[in-house]
């Protein structure tokens, strides 16, 4: 019997709120999940569901104001990150936890050369690395992520690269220090298809090479999830609605929202002229989510109680969690440890959730089942104003365009990415 996987990160009851014109917007509202060592965990959901805010909360990069972490625990290697002193948190960022941001200019400082920013990161976390060695590492990394002539281009500033190249530079920086946890927020959206798969491969190579790196992969793209991840969480309205092995999710999605997402995927086994289905309606504004189930205004299975009673997240089968009144624990009839196999997903039974027979079936070769943490009321409430980053979450950092705000806000950005708080006198050559 193989040993159970060890948890690298556990997010418990995370609540991250924003003040929006005097009203409280609950961008992340009680999110719990865990990621095992060396696992690739996907986080999917439509725009505005709270994926990036979850990621930024893990790194404590929520801009304050207007945001704050209201409650929760973020346990990394057994230690809660939320109460950590800034200095300790900074040591973790880049070194043990790296992030590929959705917007590359969040992470790159426009006023310094790419080479300088690489060296800052490498030399800060790997004391004793010479400038020449750091340059060599940076040049190699740039070539690896598909920036041609990487060593020479270290002398260039971020604006001298295309958008796709900037994305690749940021990816190279995130990989540079072989972190234990790589958070990749839509890492490939700005890239063309061939580069996309190269980048995903690079991330997976890193995981194989270190033997411990786990990846939190945030994406809209369920095909990327199917190819890359082992388990996945589906998010809607600031809450996780379903957690499953990827194989289980594709074979037998339980939550009506997940089923809607899967039905909107193109399928090679269906006639091409068949129009893809979409989830009816639009995501409500963050301030206007309804009471009861967050999804009821768009749910084809909605019942009266859904409009007033918020469903709890429940473990409905080993390793499968779902937040829906209609999906009862035990409804999959799986014995503990049994995988969701093709037979289990083959057709509707009494226990099959309504609409499930329409589910997309895309079996995957590899599955890891595990339990997710139960939601838990978090640490004491209250804004962590002093701890949240002003510049970390905003595109290009506050005022980064003129080179001022990026420096002012740099102290709370991941060090290997941006921390450049003094002029690079000795770096004019790079
Ligand atoms: N600085 C902010 N101030 C106010 N609201 C914010 C702020 N940052 C995020 N939000 C809100 O929090 C909600 C969740 O945003 P988030 O960026 O996490 O979405 P997402 O799931 O990453 O979407 P996408 O797929 O478009 O990247 C959104 O409604 C967003 O408007
Ligand atoms: S709780 Fe009700 S509205 Fe929500 S997903 Fe389930 S059936 Fe739909
Ligand atoms: Mg996002």
Image (cartoon, helix red, strand yellow):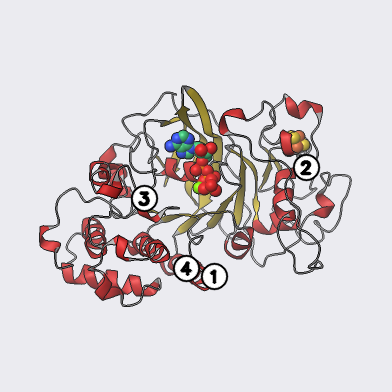
**What residue lies at 26% left-to-right and 43% top-to-bottom?**
405
**What residue lies at 44% left-to-right and 60% top-to-bottom?**
213
Q: Which residue is under mark 3? A: 106
Q: Which residue is under mark 2? A: 330
Query: In which image quadrant can residue 312 be found?
Result: top right
Query: In which image quadrant can residue 256 be found?
Result: top right
Q: Tell me which label, 2 or 4, sits earlier in the chain.
A: 4
**What residue lies at 20% left-to-right and 71% top-to-bottom?**
133
Q: Which label sits in the foreground, 2 or 3? A: 3
The foreground one among 126 and 154 is 154
Q: Which residue is under mark 1? A: 193
Q: Which label sits in the foreground, 4 or 1? A: 1
Q: Secondary structure at mark 2?
A: loop
Q: Secondary structure at mark 1?
A: helix
Q: Is residue 61 above or below residue 189?
A: above
- Between marks 3 and 4, how big is the CA–CA gap? 19 Å
């Amino acid at each position: 019997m193989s040993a159970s996987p060890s948890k690298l990160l556990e997010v418990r009851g995370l609540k991250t709120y924003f003040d929006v014109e005097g009203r409280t917007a609950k961008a992340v509202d009680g999110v719990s999940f865990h990621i095992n060592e060396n696992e690739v965990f996907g986080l999917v959901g439509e725009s505005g569901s709270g994926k990036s805010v979850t990621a930024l909360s893990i790194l404590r990069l929520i801009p304050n104001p207007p945001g704050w972490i209201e409650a929760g625990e973020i346990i990394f290697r057994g230690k809660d990150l939320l109460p950590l002193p800034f200095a300790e948190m900074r040591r973790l960022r880049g070194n043990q936890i790296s992030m590929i941001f959705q917007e590359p200019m969040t992470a790159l400082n426009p006023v310094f050369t790419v080479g300088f920013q690489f060296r800052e990161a490498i030399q800060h976390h790997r004391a004793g690395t010479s400038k020449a060695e750091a340059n060599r590492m940076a040049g190699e990394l740039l070539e690896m992520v598909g920036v041609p002539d990487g060593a020479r281009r270290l002398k260039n500033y971020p604006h001298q690269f295309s958008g796709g190249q900037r994305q690749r530079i940021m990816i190279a920086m995130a990989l540079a220090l072989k972190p234990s946890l790589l958070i990749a927020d839509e890492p490939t959206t700005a890239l063309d298809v061939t580069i996309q798969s190269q980048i995903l491969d690079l991330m997976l190579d890193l995981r194989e090479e270190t033997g411990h790196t786990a990846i939190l992969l945030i994406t809209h793209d369920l095909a990327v999830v199917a190819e890359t991840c082992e388990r996945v969480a589906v998010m809607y309205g600031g809450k996780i609605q379903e957690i499953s092995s990827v194989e289980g999710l594709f074979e037998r999605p339980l939550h009506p929202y997940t089923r809607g997402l899967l039905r909107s995927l193109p399928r090679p086994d269906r006639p091409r002229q068949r129009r893809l289905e979409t989830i009816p309606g639009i995501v409500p504004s963050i301030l206007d989510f309804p009471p009861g189930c967050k999804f009821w205004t768009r749910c084809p299975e909605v019942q009266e109680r859904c409009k007033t009673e918020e469903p709890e997240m429940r473990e409905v089968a080993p390793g499968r969690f779902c937040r829906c009144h209609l999906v009862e624990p035990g409804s999959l009839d799986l014995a503990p440890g049994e995988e969701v196999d093709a037979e289990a997903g083959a057709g509707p039974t009494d226990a099959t959730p309504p609409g499930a027979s329409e589910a997309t079936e895309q079996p995957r070769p590899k599955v890891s089942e595990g339990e997710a943490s139960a939601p838990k009321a978090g640490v004491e409430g209250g804004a962590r104003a002093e701890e949240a980053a002003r510049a970390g979450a905003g595109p290009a950092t506050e005022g980064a365009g003129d080179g001022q705000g990026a420096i002012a806000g740099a102290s709370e950005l991941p060090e290997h990415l941006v921390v450049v708080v003094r002029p690079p006198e000795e770096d004019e050559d790079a």
